[in-house]
Image (cartoon, rainbow, N blue to C red):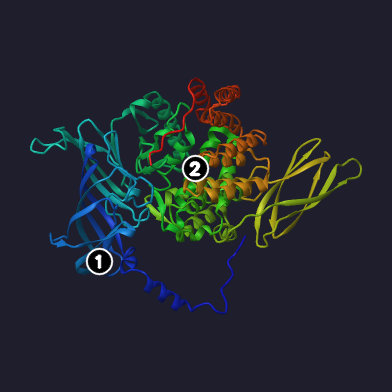
Amino acid sequence: MFFAPRRQCRALPAILILLLLTASLPVWAAEKTRLRVDDYQIAVELTPHTHKIAARAKVKFTALEDINAAIFELHNGLRVTKVTDDAGRSLNPERITQDSAVRVQLTQPLTKDSSATLTFEYDGAINSADDSPVQGLKLVSIDDDTSYLLYAGRWFPVNAYGINRFTATVSVTVPAHMVVIGSGKATVADAPASKKPLSAGLPTKTFTFAWDKPSFPGTIVAGTFQEFKADEAGVDLHVYFKPVHQNQGAQYLETALKEFTYFVTLYGPGPSTTLKVVELPDDTVPDAWAPEMAAIASRAVTDKVNYRLLANTISHQWWGASVSPDSIDDWWLCDGFARYSEARYVENAAGSAGLEEVVKDMSVGALAYDSVPLATIGKLDMYSPEFQSLATDKGAMILHMLRWVEGDQKFDQTMRNFASKYAGKSASLDNFTTVAEQSYGDKLTWFFTQWLDSTGAPEFKTKYTVYRLGNNKGFRVVGQITQDLDLFRMPVELKIDTDGKTEEKRIDVVGTDSAFTIETFGKPRRISIDPDNRVLRNSADVKLRASIQRGQALVQQGDMSGALTEFNKALESNKNSSLAHYRIAEVFFMQKNYQASANAYRDSLNGDGEPRWTEVWSHIQLGKIFDVTGQRERATNEYRQALQTNDNTQGAQEEARKYLSKAYEVPKSTG
């Protein structure tokens, strides 16, 4: 573990640093956390054909200290037309574009613990990622096929995103052919005769959702859906899929029911016995959640149920909707807990082998950006790869290791007690630590300090000597486990394969060198350290995959040069890595450097073959390159070789057949 050293000598006095920081910030920055929103009363009209939204939001809030202004986050694509206070007096809102926010100067100062209400009227036309509060990410869209207003899109005045719990009543008026999904039971009313139709003379309906338990009921999805529903095991379950996916609805309904009831068994009751699984378009996030809602992108709705993504999203009913983080630094209590809930369901459905694969993925994510302690991730951009990787994967690995330390029974008790004690509340690391220690029966300061307040992970090595015991009594193994972190402390499992019975022993590894002695009846053949991946640790494979993950993030950001650097770092760990060669080939293909791309795809085929799908997709991509360069016969040969693998990862077989019948063409640029 790396612990940041104390600054010495020339460091500025703390009070001077504080003054400099405060002086450099705009006045409104210090006002962000000075209030708590308690309730929203929102009426919104959607006109999908023209992408327009018009809304009126009545916001009741409480001052956490004396204030004379209130600041709320609001999508920059929305134009505030009017703000009034409790007495109906008009106020002058100030737009803070760089922070997707609105600042309202109050007519009278509000003292601590006093409440007030502001009413916002605003409108806009939104169907792109322009002006999104998260650059390049489409979180609000008003469209004919599907309209979605995600809480993360700040389509209503938001305070302390993901932290400030609130109640809400939301009324949504849409064309009458659309269905609206939100948090709470919907009441539906036809628009009164006097109401002007939204557009083209279309009749309208108004869906109203009331959520009276503080949470995050801020997501709305509207469109034409095929509904599937079940009422089993006390669960009122609904699946809303687009007509094109109606054949998959029954499967997803069945899977969602199994996952929801599994989490009830594991954690106790959630915030509601109702769950609505809804399909989102592919132009937004892969998944989203709200009380009673689990939304997944259309690309995840396949014949083979994407049960991992679905489990992760559903588990947010406990970790997010019910128990939420007390601060941004505590965000792993939401996303990390959901990630490990996904792993637990995989273990339940696919056994220990399935869990092992998920743990490998989590280990890579946990160490890909391990430069900031998890306990202080609030200093990172919430939507950065660094933040997401640490909060989600390292958070999940901490739970996985805690399970190993406590044992299954005490760990399950910890999770259930935590879910129960903080249901409907926010919670901090200290809260979770207290619950864990009560279940464990001892202090766990050493554990949480090690994994949350520091960075890094051990890389285990072992050296040992085998002695034969007299009178055919077996063998004694005397050795040491070494690693390079001086303050490290964790129980680690040793597995000794012998020519007879396999022996396992739990060793307390403390410091850089830890001795062990094990007696076996059969002659030891091989010793494995942590064979079941109970501890977050470095290895050549983890380093390789971490480099590839960082490279893929850079590709998404458009930094191809940086991505190639990371992929080449992966080859330094394993020059035969099929995956690293494949990712390099992808970058060259995107750059239309077809010769370099073809060479890299050939290297992938000649590599270690891990993962297996690199073979089928390398053949397909080579076929595309030959098509683009006018070598149709060579292209069809590659497509046939792809079919011969019988690997259908991500629809590979259909892709190969498609281009076997018709040559691939480079898509025309859309600018």
Q: Please provide percent x and percent y for residue 84.
A: 16, 59
- For this orientation, the residue located farthest to the right is 471
Specify whether 212 is left or right of 302. Answer: left
| Residue 199 image offset from top left, x and y in percent | 16, 36
Q: Are marks 1 and 2 in contact (CB under 8 Å)?
A: no
Mark 1 neighbour density, 10 Å: few (under 14) some (14–19) many (20 or more): some
Q: Quadrant of the N terminus?
A: bottom right
**Kind of residue at badge 1:** Ala
Q: Compared to 285, does 233 lie above or below?
A: above
- Reading the image, the residue beneath label 1 is 69
Badge number at residue 341:
2
Quarter of the rendering containing residue 192:
top left
Give the residue drawn at x 61%, y 48%: 404
Q: Is residue 559 shown to the viewer in this render?
A: yes
Residue flagged by tag 2: what amino acid is it? Ser
- Under circle 2, the secondary element is helix
Residue 449 is left or right of residue 573, and the answer is left
Q: Nearer the viewer, mark 1 or mark 2?
A: 1
Q: Residues within 10 Å of mark 2 (few under 14, many from 20)?
A: many
Measured along the vertical axis of the image, is residue 466 above or below residue 103? Answer: above
**How far from the left and from the top, in percent, is residue 421?**
42, 52
The numbered mark, 1 or 2, whose residue comes first in the sequence reads 1
